[in-house]
Amino acid sequence: MSQEQKLLVVKDLNTTFQTPAGPLPAVGGVSFDLNKNETLGIVGESGSGKTVLSRTIMGLQPRTNVTVSGSVLLNGFEVVGASEEEKRKIWGLQVAMVFQDPMTSLNPVTRVGKQIDEILRVRMGMDRQSAKARAIELLELVGIPSPSQRYRVFPGELSGGMRQRVVIATALAGSPQLLMADEPTTGLDVTIQAQILNLLEEIKERLKMSVVLVTHDLGVVATRTSRIIVMYAGRIVEIGSTREVFAHHRMPYTRALLDGSPKVSNPSHTRLMAIPGRPPNLQDLPPGCSFAPRCSYATDRCHQERPELEPSGAPGHFFACWNPLPTTRGVPA
Amino acid sequence: MSSSPLVREMIEDATVRDTPPRKRRLGILFWACVGWLILNLLAAILANVLPMKNPFFQDYAVVNASPSLHHLFGTDDLGRDIFSRVVFGSRVSIEVGLGAMFIGFGFGGPLGMLAAYRRGKFDTFLTTFMYIFLAFPAIIATIAVLSFWTPRSLLKIIVVVGIASVPIIYRVIRTATMNIATKDYVIAAKVQGATDRRILVKELLPNVAPIGVSFLLIGVATVITLEGSLAFLGLSVNPPTPSWGNMINESRAILQTNPWLAIFPSVAMCLFLLCLNFIGDRLRSHFDVTEVKL
């Protein structure tokens, strides 16, 4: 594995919040890497640590009450332990972020064009005129009709889908190599979701970026990612190529997630399988597998010993389970 | 196949809203209040130039006169024209109001924003300090300081009242900033590599400003009342300089024979404060919804 191919290398990353009720390990022992021009999906339930993971990778933590250990190597830059000043050099230019709710991720009192301009002038050293021209170009790139007129509007005058396009345009302004999209479509309605996801895909191809797509919706990652990380209780429980994870998943939690999402192939009125119980309290994790209390395959060993990631046989496919599902190789998903 | 109006509407909605949302109106009462304030301010500024009677001239021929064409508001017990004293008196009130808020916002505003943005030990220390400050009743503290800090002058009153207002303004601005500092667009600006100063000036300030402005107006009104109370206790500017509070204080002794001396400065003060409070409140509710203007 040559290091040049890797845009992002995460090794044994831990993020722990110090709360009055004791330490809260939101992310534990996460390791993975991301190739250039690759789209990686991170899926999990609410509270599985995927948002904290994506923010830790960016180096975005509260100033206090949090400890981060491990390593995040972004294009050779060590994010963990870097000062705000050092991180400011990569923020916007190497890595950018698209937020969940386009209603709150644009400044309501600044014209949308100015919000894109800002980074072009301040970070890229463009003058007023070329920054404006570039901003309009970016608005066009993200599919906003009559961009030179939209340059002057306030976010409140745009619909949700349009705002998310503007957010993407601001993220692209610094031509980053890595785009972190934290549930970029959760705040939008379904018809617009597909548009935004297709836009991200198209832009990624055109600008040769890498994208990390954080979501709880397996449908979102199914066709648009090359690899998937499944997270549970702050840990990776399964990682592999998208095809592999969908077709030959070994971890019962992945299965449960898949059973919980609707499929076109299901006959109508099929009941979706819900996962029994609730995600565990991170402050009071069981000693064994975190999923054991909700898992129908759990044995005594699951409750006592935590499984580590082990290879499934297929290249790059790992899972953490003592009682993995039998290989479903050959069975279509 | 022609698309139905509903479908067309949906398509339009999915792209861009072509007409900006209708501007919400502030109402005629709001503008009437603004007009009254401007009139008061102009009168205060131009008092020397306007064709008015000398507020210090004691005309013993007409003491305690009722309102007439010659003396619009009548005269006081020393034969001074009440109208011109009310106009000149507004200067003290307005100066104290604006001056004290200048000091209050000058310190309380930036400190509140900084504390809310930085958080941590800086915030804890400063906020605790301000809350201790706040635990003293402001009026008692002001009275105590002004009683001993003699000779009294307008500047001293402004300084004391201004300092007393710092913790209150600090608290309001800090809360408003904290509310905004956790918004996604502030984090978005940060991950675009904006410096702290840039975030404070470009992201936080424009969003805190409307709340600040409306609180400023209400603050000016509060301070003017405070000056009135101080004057009533004889702790404001020294006679014969008129101030609304001073005049009401002087009227106490002759209230039964000449109520005009109490009525006119009270009405002037009341109207002024009413306008300030109304405008402040109206602006606050007007700006409160910048984000959900859907």
Image (cartoon, rainbow, N blue to C red):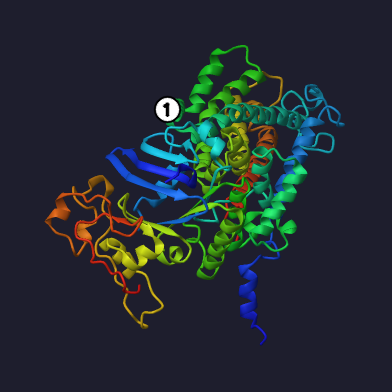
Q: Quadrant of the C terminus of chain B?
A: bottom right
- Name the residue at the bottom extreme: B1
Q: Which residue is located at x 51 percent, y 50 percent? A: A36
- Left or right: residue B239 versus residue B142 is right
Q: Where is residue B4? Give x, y as percent.
A: 64, 83
Does residue A133 sit above or below A219 in this rendering?
A: above
Q: Which residue is located at x 57 percent, y 53 percent? A: A208
- Left or right: residue B45 versus residue A241 is right
Residue A91 visible in the snapshot:
yes
In the image shown, does B227 or A125 lie closer to the viewer?
Answer: A125
Give the amino acid at mark 1. Lys
Residue located beneath label 1 in the image: B121
Does residue A300 sit above or below B276 in this rendering?
A: below
Mark 1 neighbour density, 10 Å: few (under 14) some (14–19) many (20 or more): few
Q: Secondary structure at mark 1?
A: helix
Does residue B124 sit above or below A147 in this rendering?
A: above
Q: Where is residue B110? Give x, y as percent.
A: 57, 30
